[in-house]
Image (cartoon, grey):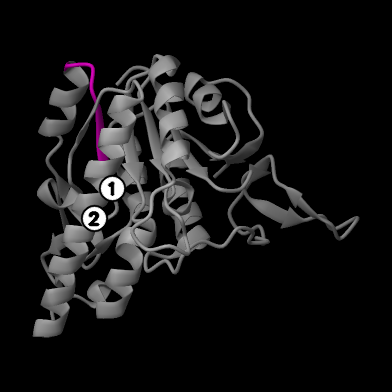
Amino acid sequence: MRELVVLKLGGSLITEKDKPFTLRRRVLERLGEELSNAGKPLILVHGGGSYAHPVAKRYDVSEGYRSARHLEGFVETAIAVRRLNLEVVEILSHSGLKSIGVPASTIILTKSGRILACNFEPVFSALDLGLAPVTCGDVVFDRELGFTVLSGDAIASYMASRLRADRLIYAVDVDGVYVRDRATNRVVLAEEFRPGMPIEPLGESVEDVTGGIVRKLEEGFRAAEKGVEVYVVNGLREGVVESAVRGERVRGTRLKP
């Protein structure tokens, strides 16, 4: 799809990591304004942040259906995710980006934790109408496990690859991926990051049952290997996400397979 951009909004970017069920409303309002001005067809994916991750971890939902307790956790996590997705869509829409929620559990099926199938029809219909479909990391039905937790990072990578997006942008709460400079022993931002390079983690987010920065990079490289330009940028810096969506050069990290 020509000029399509898939944008993943990290859970620690849009929620208060230490306050359950608390949005960073001003961040979302600003991002809604920026994205409405970017002028590109967009698919948005957001993380679960302080809404979904604590609930999913408490019930060990990622293990699948093993007991009534796991099933209870599946339902509770789904409720938390729906609440977050609805609030995110409401704020983005009221800030200028006309969008519609598309829960991942209604369009995606996994097998042993990996995406097996996705019904893109609601996504295509939204894009055709000039809307930005907004999905998110979610609990989904799984052919082997009964259900599991599927990360927003995996969803974003899968959609960008399948739809041959121009760019996949991971917007997080730091400037990109950090490495240690061998010459100076200082921690520096990597303008390009390749598989196997050692990471210096910064800005660790709320307890993440879907793998954190390592999983994000693994999923990002999957899309990069398919020819998608993949970037990690700081969504807290004003104007950075808008410029990245436009294809302009910004401070951040590009993943190079």
Q: Residue at x 12, y 75 (%)?
A: 72
Q: Identify the disc placed on residue 81.
A: 2
Which residues make up the magenta segment? Answer: 129-136
Would residue 143 be found to the left or right of residue 196 on screen?
left
Q: Is residue 10 left or right of residue 76?
A: right
Under circle 2, the secondary element is helix
Residue under label 1: 136
Query: Hey, what amino acid is under mark 2?
Result: Val
Q: Main secondary structure of the magenta part?
A: strand
Return the x and y of residue 223 as percentages of the image width and height: 41, 42
139 and 17: which is toward the camera: 17
The picture quadrant where one finds residue 22 is bottom left
Q: Looking at the picture, does residue 198 appear above or below residue 44?
A: below
Q: Which quadrant does the C terminus fall into?
A: top right
Tag 1 or tag 2, which sits nearer the N-term? 2
At which x and y percent is residue 253?
A: 62, 41
Give, as a three-letter code, the residue at label 1.
Answer: Cys
